[in-house]
Image (cartoon, grey):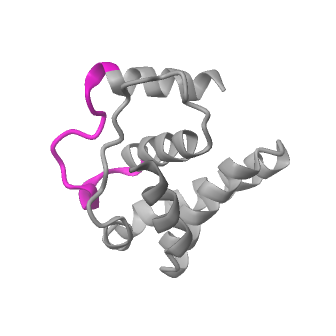
């Protein structure tokens, strides 16, 4: 889980890896960083990083549907792999987080994602 810790530290040091671009214009790397941060925080993986702010997307379901098609496909493939990896390592809470993003992005079924995001507020 060092990767997650490094990601959280990097985000907290830079203030935001997402720049001033609206979330609908983020590239795959920016979305992946955001998803990693949200999922790790929701699973308690980044508990040691007090003061880390999650840059909240105002309307996450709509932001996900506004993603450009090539970015959407890349994220779907990445999320599918991350979900399988997390479940394979018996990290069920993280797997559920990745699955929530995948379902919202793929089928616009966003209830689980809205619950995950609400828990972080």
**Residue sitting at 27 percent across and 33 percent down?**
16
Query: Seen in the image, is 70 located left or right of residue 113?
Result: left
Whether the magenta-drawn stretch holds residue 20 is answered as yes
Residue sitting at x 61%, y 56%: 98
Relative height, residue 107 to residue 67 (above, below): below
Number of numbered labels in the structure image: 0
- SS assignment for the magenta stretch, majority: loop
When asked about the image quadrant of residue 60, the answer is bottom left
Q: Quadrant of the N terminus?
A: top right
Residue 36 rendering spot, x and y as whole percentages? 52, 42
Residue shown at the point (52%, 79%) measured from the top left: 109
Residue 73's spot in the image, x, y percent?
50, 65
Q: Position of residue 102 (x, y in %)?
A: 57, 66
- Foreground of the two, 80 or 86: 86
Q: Quadrant of residue 45?
A: top right
Residue farthest to the left, as pictured: 20
Q: Position of residue 104 (x, y in %)?
A: 50, 72
Is residue 108 on the magenta stretch?
no
| Residue 73 to residue 98: above or below | below
Question: Which residue: 69% across, 50% down?
Answer: 93
Query: Vertically, is 35 above or below 60?
Result: above
The residue lying toward the viewer, choosing from 76 and 94, is 94
Q: Is residue 8 above or below residue 102?
A: above
First to last magenta residue range: 13-28
Nearest the camera: 47 or 94? 47
């Amino acid at each position: 889980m060092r990767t997650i810790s490094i990601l959280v530290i990097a985000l907290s040091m830079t203030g935001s890896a997402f720049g001033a671009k609206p979330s609908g214009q983020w590239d795959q790397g920016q979305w992946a960083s955001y998803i990693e941060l949200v999922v790790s925080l929701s699973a308690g993986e980044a508990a040691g990083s007090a003061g880390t702010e999650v840059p909240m997307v105002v309307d996450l379901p709509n932001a996900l549907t506004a993603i450009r098609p090539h970015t959407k496909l890349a994220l779907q493939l990445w999320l599918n792999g991350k979900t399988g990896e997390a479940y394979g390592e018996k990290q069920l809470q993280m797997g559920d987080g990745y699955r929530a993003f995948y379902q919202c992005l793929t089928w616009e079924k966003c209830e689980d994602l809205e619950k995950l995001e609400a828990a972080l507020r």
